[in-house]
Amino acid sequence: MKKALTITGIFVAVILVGLLLLLTIVETNKPKPPKAITEAVAVTVPLSTFNVPVRFKLEKLEKYLNTIVTGTFLEKSIFLQSSKKEAVYLTLTKKEALTVTSDGKVLFCTLPLTVDAKLVKSRFGNLLTRLFKPLQTSLLITVSTPVALDNKWNVSTKFTITGYQWIKEPVLRFGPFRKTITKYLDNEIQKQSRVLTEILDKEINGKVSLRPTVSGVWKSLQKPIAIHKKPPKAWLRFICEDIQGSVKLSRKEIICQTLLKARALVVTDTTAEKAPLPLPSFSQLPENGTAQQSDIYLYAFTTFSEINEQLNDYFKGKTFTEKGRSIKINSIGAYASEKGITIAVETNELFKGKLYISGQLAFDVPSQKLQVHNFDYALNSKSALIQTGDDLLHTSIKQAVASKLHLNLETEIEKVPAIVHHAISKGKAGKTIDLAVNDIQIRSCDIFMGKEKIHLIINVSTEAKIDLKRIKPGKRITISKVLPLMPVATDTEKS
């Protein structure tokens, strides 16, 4: 009896030692979880530069001027001699469409004017004066101006007459008598030229303004854009810091290259939103300050709770099978660790505890996709998992997790084109402008991980342009310079 108890005790002791040894081996081979990041990350978004050319086609300006400017340019009597014995009643009228052109440096406006002249006094007496046929001919007057913007973002012009051409020489006729009055009319047109140029300047400087369009973009950027609709809710808002412009001419357009600097700010409460800053006065952009593309920095984030919810929805309870071996995932969770992003996978296998897969999130520019680099298990090389041939099984798990891990982050990145377009064009498309935001490309995506969130700083390039479709026409202007008519001498007065 005593011997049997001794044998039983030895057997139990061997079993206990074996179990202890097994537990020691398992614990020795059990992977240790990578150390978790326990602090939040402070993220600063770099300054963004928006390059937005505002274009206004010359054909639109031409249409506007033809709509608003019409009528008589000059109406008066002029003397043909210093003795004042001969006088002509002269009228210059705009009856045909003017044209607006450019050589790329200067703006030209060519006005066809109808010239009507009638001899109202001559040394031949009043009777013979009436026998001279009234004259009608045409004159092309060309005015030109440089183009600039004033401090209120209005187009500024200073037209001067650069030339004119008679379509047909102005000659008064009566039978065999001919009287050429070109030099007299030339002299009068030179005297009155400023009347025409002042009217053109007034109608352009007061009506052709980029302020509504530029101000619209400036204010739109400052309005919050929802970037995270689930709690914690967040909005992106740009704080505009500076804006400059540079005006140039092409052969078909007036172009204002606008450079706007703003910094993205994340807000969590739109009720405390400040009123948008007003558009500053126009400031001249240096010649080397223009660029074709905008350089924009955006912010986005997702939470580990959202990622874990998504991972568990897909993997919890899922069974993987390879070559007759099966393993079931009981739970899965992601967290930020000193090794990057770590996924803790709890399976149904006894003694093997959790599996830990770690890697570094990175954005691949050529494919414009997120990737997980060096994504692998934190396993001892002598692990029973490897020795039992489970490597294929766990490779399947690793690949499946990697394929789903960045879906939530890619969703945030996929929002970028809509955010960029929305920021620039919010409420600005319509009857007066066309806005295009083209070729949106992600240049880089910096990823920062903290205790609760994954933060993305996304650098985007894009080409944006605004075309002014029309100017709201004001009151029609009748070009007129009416002077008191000189009294016509009668035969009685002559005698």
Image (cartoon, rainbow, N blue to C red):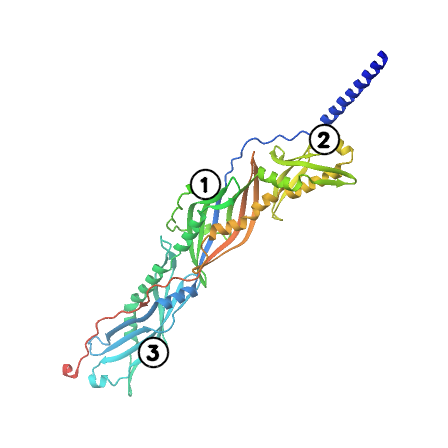
Q: Residue at x 57, y 43 (%)?
A: 445
**Mark 1–mark 2 contact, CB under 8 Å?**
no
Percent x, y for residue 189?
A: 29, 71
Give the distance between the C-alpha atoms of the residues marked 1 and 2, in whole angstroms.
Answer: 46 Å
* Circle nearer the N terminus (3, 1): 3
Quarter of the image with the C terminus is bottom left
Find the residue positioned furthest to the top.
2
Tell me if 102 is positioned left or right of 29 in this view: left
Up/down of 449 relative to 205, above or below: above
Q: How many C-alpha atoms fall within 10 Å of the one at disc 3: few (<14), some, or many (≥20)?
A: some
Tag 3–tag 1 contact (CB < 8 Å): no
Horizontally, residue 447 falls left or right of residue 427, namely right
Question: Callout 1 environment at 10 Å: few (<14), some (14 to 19), or many (20+)?
Answer: few
Looking at the rendering, which quadrant does residue 337 occupy? top right
Instruction: List x then y, in percent, for residue 204.
Output: 36, 61
Name the element at disc 3.
strand
